[in-house]
Amino acid sequence: MGKTPEIVQILRDEEDQGKLFCKKSDQIKKEHISPGQNILNNENVNTFLNHFGDGLIILNDSGEILEINHALYEMVGYSDKNEFFNNITSVAELIPKEEHKRLIKGLKDTFQKGFDTNQFHAFKKDKSQIVVDIHAKRYIDSSGKLASIVIVRDVTEKKKAENKLKERIKELTCLQKIDNTFKEKTSINDICQDIIEFIIQGMQFPEITEPYIELYDKHYSSKTYSNDLVHKLESKIIVDGGIQGYLTVYYRENKPFILPEEQNLVDTIADHIGLWIEQKESKRKLKQSEKKYRFIFEKSPIGISTADKKGRIIDIDQSGAAITGHSREELIGKSYKDLNFIDRKTMLKILKDFPKILKGKTLGPMELKITDLNGNNHILEVQITPLRENGKFTGTQVTMLDVTERKKAERDLRNSEKKYHTLFDTMAQGVVYQDAGGEIISANPAAQRILGLSLDQMQGRTSLDPRWKAVDKNKNELPGEKHPAMISLKTGKTVDNFIQGIFNPKKNDYVWIIVNSSPQFKKGADKPYQVYSTFLDITKQMKAEELFRTLVEQSTVGVYIHDPVNNKILYANPLVRSVLGFSNDEIDKVDFFKYLHPDDVKLIKNRIQKNLSGEKVDPSVEVRIFPPDSKMRWIRLYSTFIDYQGKKAALASIIDITDSKEADDKVKKYLDKLEKYRDTTVGRELRVVELKKEINKLCREQGIPIKYKDTENALKNDRLEMEVNS
């Protein structure tokens, strides 16, 4: 048994100028203890020490340790009492320094008020810490001295369980808020911002949590996020089987994540983002499995209530009361059968099964429908457990979980699956599923019609089967390993807008299809377990395109497509290539403007700018070009802007008008000469007429006949013509 003189110094009352906080035994007995109260003899104390399951410490009124039991020294890691007293010289050494003030107050309360209950951390022999509940009781030993019995109970595991429950509740609250966000918000930007805010609250260490969402080409993060963070949990955001982003949660410090729970939280939210995007933006795409439609989500913490053997509620927690819409005070003391939120049919069933509960059998889990105070209907998953004391039935404990939203989700899932199967069977697009080895496992009616094979004929066939007689868009043989589905399985990536030809045995001809293949992954897997391909029959379009290509290639008019932004020739028919002097292999290196006359470059660029800005421009223009190793030529250029391969481009046709231009120039020169000659001749004739008129005038004045009657007749005709015109 050890003495602890240090405790006297530790437990001094600083406000009492160094005096011990305890009053003298006689004074305490006089002020607080009535005769015969709390008197224990040594035999009583020894009985406690030897038989009590929890740890015990006996202290005198000076705070010295008088005795401990085996449960106490084993609790803190010592092999026997001597080892304990050889290492521990004071109670304070068992308690962390930051908790000493509470320890002092507790001992004061014990000796002055008679009892104290508290919770502390305590050091074990190996310096690890445990959490202990302290229950101290003052008593007077058989010699009349004031002492205290301190019961010490290790509640470390209980504390851990409580903390774990708190973390689960935080996660549930986080998921509840995020679920409401998905229901209420319509913008993915707003949803991602809310997720960033709510997921912080759901993590074990929110004060160091930095969420980050990468989705398509956008990024969302907390305000204090930085790119140098490395300690993280991460989950893929999968949309229609493809990875479209990541949800990542970082800790700024190297503190542990709770696994697998917090990883499951991140995975669930990432899955929900993907599902929301699919439902919002990809309604025409196929939904592959129940996982894509299912969102397992527990809405709230479990409600718990206890009732006596007559069914009267003794106590109910806030969660249980909130489900009913009533307050705890309104429910406590009421009988279950008198509560109007439980429908009569359900209550009769419970009463019918109540004898089973009396015999000790747990009832449930079962579904129970209630209507809360506000008239809202709820479906609860309920379990009723009998409570017994000394073998006798004393009442029941009811646990309840609100599964209304889960039931609604299951109903919606069934409806969604029904719609999916209807879509799968009736859609115009062909759909084919292949396993990891490339074997076809399923195909919809449209696929069977387009490919000319029944499902039985297709099942088990792979893309490598030569019976497909597949060709690429240039009609070259297409090996099976280059089919889009096989590429998707090999690379784990989607293949979009792949054009190929497949031999249709029913039509005894090729059909052309445009294919999109998407790999499917099981959670956590790196390789796809299957691939699905959707395709459309574009045979008519391909034949029309081939006809158009033939017309363009053989046209006597030059046709080309020009990328005005990057000044690239995207396509040119043989006539254009011949006029400008380049081969088809050199087309991507051709600078269109270098062929133009310098005076016409500005004209064409100005027309391009107006077209790009939407201004109306005359589609026809005449320009000069300089083909290599040839003289300048004139062309008439007709152009219009089109969308080509996702870009705005100019579709243009050209006609060589050089010969026409040269002929026009010759005609113009002849006309100019003729005009000059006419001007000279007409002027001379007019002068002769004027002279004749003057001679006739003189003849009249002299009274002799006029000399030039033809001139006079011409003059009369001119006057008559002027009168008619007027």
Image (cartoon, rainbow, N blue to C red):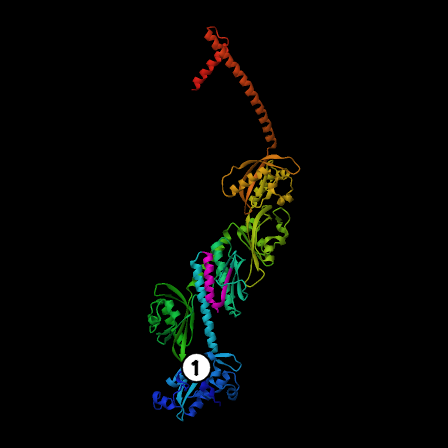
Give the residue displayed 44% in from the left and 19% down from the top.
725
Q: Secondary structure at mark 1?
A: helix
Instruction: Tell which residue pokes out farthest to the bottom in this image.
Output: 143
Q: Percent position (x, y) of residue 250?
A: 52, 65
Residue span colored magenta: 187-213
Please rate how many residues cluster around mark 1, counting C-alpha atoms within 10 Å: few if below 14, some from 14 to 19, many from 20.
many
- In-front residue for pair 467/180: 180
Residue 413 visible at all: no
Assign the C terminus to one quadrant of the image.
top left
Magenta-drawn stretch, dominant element (helix, strand or loop): helix
Q: Is residue 619 above or below residue 484?
A: above
Residue 712 visible at all: yes
- In-front residue for pair 572/401: 572
Give the residue displayed 55% in from the left and 65% down from the top.
230
Q: Is residue 361 above or below residue 664?
A: below
Q: Is residue 165 above or below residue 663?
A: below
